[in-house]
Amino acid sequence: MSILDSLAKSDLDEARRKIQELQPEAESERERGSLMAASGILASISKGKDGTLQSWDSAKVERAAKSIVSSQMADDFDAGYAETLLSYSKLTAGTRQSAE
């Protein structure tokens, strides 16, 4: 199970363990950006109600991620960050729709 799968299932201890395990192994800026995004999602879920992101709006996340990637100032770190946000958004899209 991936970090994002653990986050989607609100298995925060497992997600935290995986992030800590992978941080020293991250060699590229893209990998570091991905881990930073996963850490941010984890922090937000940890602070959220019932271990979920209550205000997550997939459409806004997708627009923001595309904006990050298309920026002339974006680098590999930014691309990894944006890709992880999009992946998490897609992973949780079905769960959010069925909850509504």
Image (cartoon, rainbow, N blue to C red):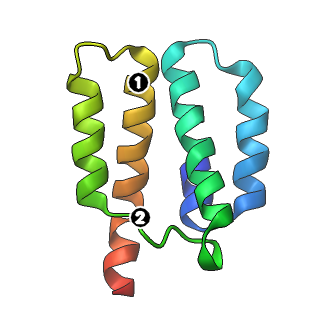
The quadrant in which the C terminus is found is bottom left
Amino acid on which the number 1 mark rests in the picture? Asp
Residue 83 rendering spot, x and y as whole percentages:
38, 36
Do we see residue 100 in this rendering?
Answer: yes
Disc on the earlier residue, 2 or 1: 1
Residue at 31% from the left image edge and 51% from the top image edge: 61
Judge by depth and name the residue closer to the eye, 42 or 2. Answer: 42
> In the picture, residue 66 is in which quadrant?
top left
Q: Are marks 2 and 1 in contact (CB under 8 Å)?
A: no
* Along the line of sight, the residue nearer the viewer: 5 or 78: 78
Q: Residue 97 at what x, y percent from top left?
A: 31, 78
Percent x, y for residue 72? Answer: 23, 13
Residue 48 to residue 19: above or below: below
Residue at the disc numbered 2: 92
For image coordinates 66% across by 65% down, the residue present is 47
Q: Residue 21 is drawn in which quadrant? A: top right
x and y percent of residue 84 in the render? 44, 40
Residue 1 left/right relative to 98 = right
Question: Furthest residue to the bottom?
Answer: 100
- Kindly identify which numbered label has been placed on residue 78: 1
Q: Amino acid at mark 2?
A: Thr
C-alpha separation, residue under disc 2 versus residue under disc 1: 21 Å
73 or 41: nearer the eye?
73
Q: Is residue 1 visible?
A: no
In the displayed structure, 49 sits above or below 6; it is: below
